[in-house]
Amino acid sequence: MTRLARVDMDAVAPLYPSDKVAGRVAARGEHFEWEPARSGKVHSDLPLAHRAPTERELADPTYVDLSGATIGRLKVIGVAADVTSRGNQNWVVRCVCGAYETRKGRYIKACAAGNNPGSSEPMCDACGYTRKLQLGYHNPKKAAAAAEAIQNCIR
């Protein structure tokens, strides 16, 4: 008899997932505690500081004001006030899920032209992670760590 067979089902039943998607995610050991990648982007549930383009920027013939543009699930709010980067301007965007992020102007221009670098639909990183889980992608290392943790709890 295995150790798992001796587990009381009344203690385990409340831990069962409530729907099909939750069942798939729980079966792999994945979870929805998402952490942003540290690639220079800022992700926040609260509005990020932004500003309107300055007169000097608007006078430059090569400058493109992206404020108000909509690409996929993202809407450009304005220029990021606190986030600086080398060579390209950061813009604050808001996803339809309500999250705010910074994106480079180069990315926004490419998506607006139809040359989307990356996924099929531009979205915030949290929505992108959730979409990957829904499509069946998972991290085997996280799944193995979760399975090991469950086995340790059962012992």
Image (cartoon, rainbow, N blue to C red):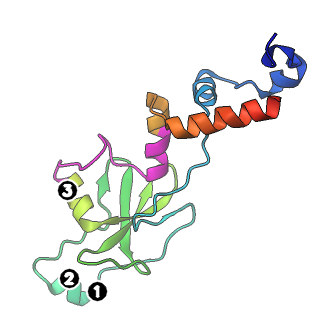
* Dominant SS type (magenta): loop
Label 3 or label 2, whichever lies nearer to me, is 3
Residue 148 placement (x, y as % from top left): 68, 34
Question: For numbered disc 1, what is the local secondary structure?
Answer: loop
Most foreground residue, 48 or 43:
43
Residue 105 placement (x, y as % from top left): 26, 67
Q: Residue furthest bottom?
A: 56
The residues tagged by marks 3 and 2 sit, at their Cα atoms, a distance apart of: 20 Å
Using the rendered image of the protein, determine whether residue 30 is visible from the camera's viewpoint: no
Marks 3 & 1, CB-CB < 8 Å contact: no
Q: Amino acid at mark 1?
A: Thr
Image quarter of the N terminus: top right
The residues tagged by marks 3 and 1 sit, at their Cα atoms, a distance apart of: 23 Å
The residues tagged by marks 2 and 1 sit, at their Cα atoms, a distance apart of: 6 Å
Q: Which mark is residue 110?
A: 3
Residue range in magenta is 112-130
Marks 3 & 2, CB-CB < 8 Å contact: no
Image quarter of the C terminus: top right
Q: Which residue is mark 2?
A: 58
Question: For numbered disc 3, what is the local secondary structure?
Answer: helix
Question: For numbered disc 2, what is the local secondary structure?
Answer: helix
Query: Residue 148 in magenta?
Result: no
Q: Residue 90 vs residue 141: left or right? A: left
Q: Which mark is residue 54?
A: 1
